Amino acid sequence: MEVPSLEGMMAEPVLATQPAPLKRATKGQVRTFGLIRERFNEERRIALNPVAVGSLTAAGHRVLIETQAGLGANFADLRYAEHGAEIVDSSGAVFAGADVMVKVGPLQSNETALVRERQIIISALHLGTTTRDGLAHLLDVGATGI
């Protein structure tokens, strides 16, 4: 059974593995990590707890987190801020400012549209449920999915 959103794309070489060297971070290079509130299927988890955020910020990285993103897992914004995270008002602002997005659940269609050029997405990627337009957008912007 073929997944409808992938139907007809299997013959296109664009879905084949496309090995390319990743631009490696140089020692001391700052990355900006982003965390948003999970909206998939009543998901309550969050990909990074405040201590993990503290490890990233202690190493010199920035962490942007959407306000109330950790509430489902009982982590208040204040806990993230105490560990160096910058609290922002919207998921759009997080996507716009982060080099690396870290999520538990898959990208939702409105989130897929926010992925920008060469952004790294660390998440469950359910490409079988992603729309054809969503897949095309991820390919067009050269996103890296992990």
Image (spheres, helix red, strand yellow):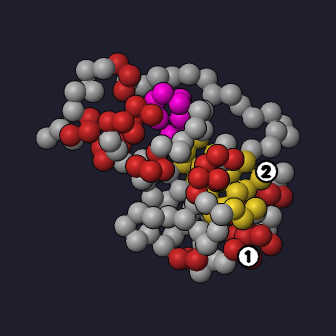
Among the 4 quarters of the image, the one containing residue 29: top right
Do the CB atoms of the residues marked 2 and 1 lie less than 8 Å apart? no
Side (left or right) of 125 relative to 62? left
Which label number is shown at residue 22?
none
Amino acid type, callout 1? Arg
Q: Nearer the viewer, residue 48 or 66?
A: 66
The local secondary structure at tag 2 comes to loop
Residue 99 included in the magenta stretch of the image: no
Residue 33 in percent (x, y) is at 68, 51
Q: Nearer the viewer, residue 60 or 112?
A: 112
- From which residue to which does the magenta span run? 138-146
Residue 143 included in the magenta stretch of the image: yes
Residue 57 in percent (x, y) is at 80, 57
Quadrant location, the N terminus: top left
Q: Nearer the viewer, residue 117 or 103?
A: 117
Question: How far separated are the C-alphas under marks 2 and 1?
Answer: 17 Å
Side (left or right) of 3 relative to 47? left
The total of numbered circles placed on residues is: 2
- Residue at position x 48%, y 73% from top? 44
- Residue at position x 37%, y 67% from top? 41
Residue 93 in percent (x, y) is at 64, 53
Which label number is shown at residue 79?
1
Amino acid type, callout 2? His
Side (left or right) of 53 relative to 142? right
For mark 1, does the 10 Å Cα neighbourhood hold few (<14), some (14 to 19), or many (20 or more) residues? some
- Residue at position x 53%, y 35% from top? 143
| Residue designated by label 2 | 61
- Residue at position x 51%, y 22% from top? 19
Q: Reply above or below: 79 against 108.
A: below
Residue 23 in percent (x, y) is at 68, 28
Q: Is residue 142 visible in this depiction of the protein? A: yes
Question: Which callout, 2 or 1, points at the residue further toward the start of the chain?
Answer: 2
